């Protein structure tokens, strides 16, 4: 493992990129998930069909295929539009931005189903009582819906987050210098790829272990006052 220690700065740099990518993608997926859940639960047929189309399409296509389409196809579409209109010159899509948009958009579909199921699990009587008490829709969401939605959604949310973390490895195929890309490049340079992949495995295990501790803390926070069997 001497070679791994020698390239520790390269690995650390890639690890920071991976963590940043995962956190920003998570933030975007939460936003997309909340919007998607609203669309799927809307009384308007057009919005409901739009939400269903989003979750069905995204969950039916492999993440790698979507990433390649957004990175290469999106770049080609933007440059074609710029050439036709003359509004801008050639645009080189940033790999990090493409990774965040792709992962956030993909996992937003899974989050939408998670949030929809959690909201549906909240007793309707509580929502009706909040409205009868004169609460505004925003107040109902922050006081009644959000705390219970988090509690009901947490198991599925945790699973989505852990899968998202592992899916960040796919971004290396579009040239982002993340943990996997840097480790593969360093491993090939010294002909010790296996050792570097073991290091990658341990780093991902550490990230998921820390995530598990944080998620358990959130679960305890939102379960205060609940009786446990």
Image (cartoon, grey):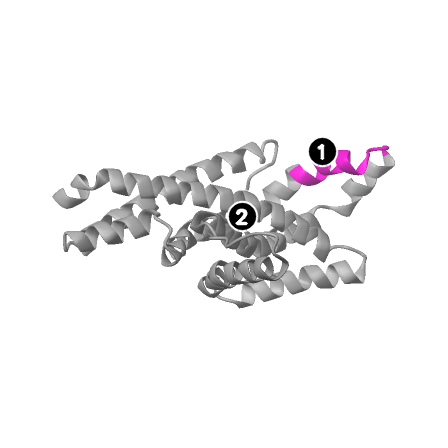
Q: Is residue 162 magenta?
A: no
Q: Quadrant of residue 64?
A: bottom left
- The spot of residue 211 in percent (x, y) is 43, 40
Which badge, 1 or 2, comes first in the chain's sequence? 1
Front one among 100 and 43: 100
Residue 58 appears anywhere in the view: yes
Q: Is residue 145 magenta?
A: yes
Residue 217 vs 119, above or below: the answer is above
Residue that sits furthest to the left in the current view: 2
Residue 67 vs 122, above or below: the answer is below
The quarter of the rendered structure image containing the N terminus is: top left
Q: Residues within 10 Å of mark 1 (few under 14, many from 20)?
A: few
- The spot of residue 166 in percent (x, y) is 40, 52
The residue at 71%/61% (across/down) is 50
Front one among 66 and 29: 66
Q: Given contact means CB atoms under 8 Å apart, are the residues at marks 1 and 2 in contact?
A: no
Question: Which residue position is annotated with label 2?
Answer: 157
In what element is the residue under mark 2? helix
Residue 202 horizontal side relative to residue 45, left or right: left
The residue at 31%/52% (across/down) is 181
Residue 199 horizontal side relative to residue 192, left or right: right
The residue at 37%/54% (across/down) is 169
Q: CA distance from mark 1 to mark 2?
A: 20 Å
Report the disc number at residue 174: none
Q: Which region is colored magenta?
A: 133-146
In what element is the residue under mark 1? helix
Question: Which residue position is annotated with label 1?
Answer: 143
The residue at 84%/38% (across/down) is 131
């Amino acid at each position: 493992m001497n070679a791994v220690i020698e390239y520790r700065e390269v690995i650390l740099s890639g690890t920071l990129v991976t963590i940043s990518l995962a956190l920003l993608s998570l933030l975007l997926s939460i936003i997309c998930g909340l919007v998607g859940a609203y669309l799927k639960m809307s009384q308007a047929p057009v919005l409901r069909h739009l939400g269903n189309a989003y979750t069905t399409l995204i969950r039916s296509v492999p993440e790698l295929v979507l990433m390649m389409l957004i990175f290469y196809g999106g770049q080609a579409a933007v440059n074609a539009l710029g050439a036709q209109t003359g509004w801008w010159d050639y645009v080189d899509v940033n790999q990090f931005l493409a990774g965040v948009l792709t992962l956030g958009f993909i996992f937003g579909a899974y989050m939408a189903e998670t949030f929809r199921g959690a909201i549906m699990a909240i007793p309707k009587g509580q929502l009706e009582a909040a409205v009868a008490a004169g609460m505004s829709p925003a107040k109902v969401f922050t006081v009644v819906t959000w705390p219970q939605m988090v509690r009901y959604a947490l198991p599925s949310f945790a699973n989505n987050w852990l899968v998202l973390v592992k899916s960040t490895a796919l971004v290396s195929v579009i040239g982002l210098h993340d943990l996997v890309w840097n480790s593969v490049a360093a491993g090939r340079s010294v002909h010790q790829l296996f050792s570097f992949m073991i290091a990658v495995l341990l780093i991902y295990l550490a990230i998921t272990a820390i995530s598990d501790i944080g998620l358990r803390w959130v679960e305890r926070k939102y379960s205060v006052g609940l009786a446990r069997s």
